[in-house]
Image (spheres, grey):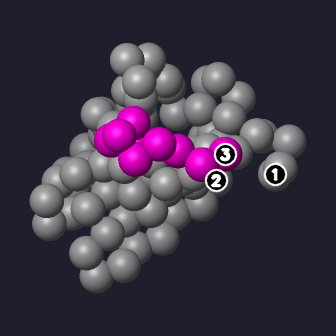
Amino acid sequence: MKVDSRLKFLTVTCYSGYKSDERPVKFTLRNRTLLVEQILDRWYGPHNSYYKILADDKKVYLIKQDREDDLWTVEKIMSSKSL
């Protein structure tokens, strides 16, 4: 499912353990708050972090954190059946 660029910005709450923003625990997309049930994958680039997560609506989200600008976006939304 392609995400309208006007709606792809997220508000994310992260767990902060030994470092800040260690992993997302919930996020708000289109005025709806979703809990992260499971982090399926994660990878890091020089300026961005990516998380493939299963949310409590049973959809899989690929979200990106731009660490330089502290900006979160949703890159892709998938059905959990695609796992």
Of 4 and 61, which appears nearest the observer?
A: 4
Residue 63 seen by the camera: yes
Tell me the distance, in whole angstroms, between the alpha carbons under discs 3 and 2: 19 Å
Q: State the SS at label 2.
A: strand
> Mark 1 or mark 3, which is nearer to you?
3
Amino acid under disc 3? Met
Amino acid under disc 2? Leu
- Is mark 1 in CB contact (under 8 Å) with mark 2? yes
Where the N terminus falls, by quadrant? top right
Asked if residue 7 lies in the magenta stretch, the reply is: yes
> Mark 3 or mark 2, which is nearer to you?
3
Look at the image and give the residue range highlighted in magenta.
1-9
Would you name the residue on which mark 3 appears? 1
Amino acid under disc 1? Leu
Q: Which mark is residue 40?
A: 2
Residue furthest right as drawn: 81
Precedes in sequence: disc 3 or disc 2: 3
- Is mark 3 in CB contact (under 8 Å) with mark 2? no
Q: Which mark is residue 68?
A: none
Q: State the SS at label 1.
A: loop
Residue 24 seen by the camera: no
Would you name the residue on which mark 1 appears? 83
